[in-house]
Amino acid sequence: MTKKLQVIRSAKEVFSGVTRHYFDLLRSAPVASFAYLLGVAIFGYITDQPADLPRKEANDAMMQAIVQQLPLAMAASFLTLAGFIAAAVRWHRFVLLGERGGPLWGRFEVRYLWTGFKLILCGCLLAIVGGLLLFLVSFNGEAAGGLAGGQVSKILAACIMIAIYFGFTVWLIRVSVAFPDAALGEGGSIGAAYRRTTGNAWRLLGYSLIVQIPLSVVVALVQMALAGAFAALLGASAKLVVTVLMLPLSLYVAMIGITMLSVAYRELVGLPQPGSEAALPA
């Protein structure tokens, strides 16, 4: 019998759990959390640009700053990625197993990283297939010629693009369950994650939207409020100060994402059996 995700209940559990156990999660991965936040802060320092610059000029200046400080930018990227992966594994294991602490980097982290590479590779392949499909539709429309043929091909291409976008989003949410699976040492198979979430595609999409949309709104409002409060006092440095002040909230957002996947995994896949690799020391 296919398990059904209880969307509202699970979303409430994610927010209440992270809010109540924020410092417990932090203590479960203190070094990794610090490395992640340090990487974010350094990258924010490198890319800091005056808030009054036009978007194109700000983007160009940001890319130029990254190129000029490439070694520091690469170090910040490494800290952010390595810190996030190590923290994510500890958070998954805390939420699902109640495990506190553990090695900074071990076989679970390696599996987590490998799962991410597999997901990126599969996503790129799907993007190529979708791009080829759109090209064929556009090419056939141009070959048909005439105003009517061109309009039909454009409408069809737009429909296909929307279908690809939603299909890819649902696929990504479903296979993301492989991350907690990898954190528990259960393999992190993309195919297995897809099969295990059968019958829950729309539930997982709704679950993700219910969690992510309010969180994004709150983050945007807090960032705008801080930027407005410090813009007049600090001028060009306001963005960097806001980045630093946003770090605790950035950590909260990361914890929400990890906990969201952990809860979905527990509800749809279940907890590992005693004596399995997941229950062994990392």
Image (tube, rainbow, N blue to C red):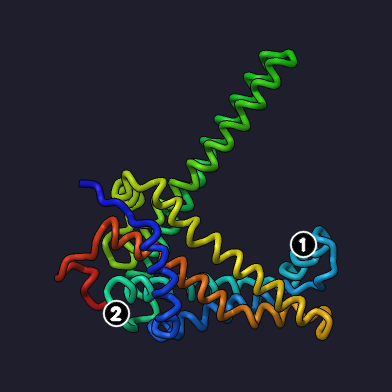
- Report helix, strand or loop for mark 2: loop
Q: Residues within 10 Å of mark 1 (few under 14, many from 20)?
A: some
Query: Residue 16: image x %, image y %?
Result: 42, 74
- N-terminal label among 1 and 2: 1
Marks 1 & 2, CB-CB < 8 Å contact: no
Q: Nearer the viewer, mark 1 or mark 2?
A: 2
Residue 140 can be seen, yes or no: yes
Front residue of this view, candidates 194 and 15: 15
**Residue at horizontal 51 percent and vertical 46 percent from the top:** 124
Query: Which residue is denoted by mark 1 in the rendering?
Result: 59
Under mark 1, the amino acid is: Asn
Distance between the Cα atoms at labels 1 and 2?
42 Å
- Report helix, strand or loop for mark 1: helix
Give the numbered dot on residue 50.
none
- Up-down relation of residue 22 to residue 176 (above or below): below
Q: Residues within 10 Å of mark 2 (few under 14, many from 20)?
A: some
- Up-down relation of residue 192 to residue 139 (above or below): below
Query: Which residue is denoted by mark 2 in the rendering?
Result: 99
Query: Residue 133: image x %, image y %?
Result: 55, 30
Under mark 2, the amino acid is: Glu
Side (left or right) of 9 relative to 272: right
**Residue at horizontal 50 percent and vertical 55 percent from the top:** 209
Residue 45 can be seen, yes or no: no
Front residue of this view, candidates 76 and 88: 88
Side (left or right) of 203 relative to 243: left
Which corner quadrant of the image does residue 162 belong to?
A: top right
Side (left or right) of 189 relative to 278: right
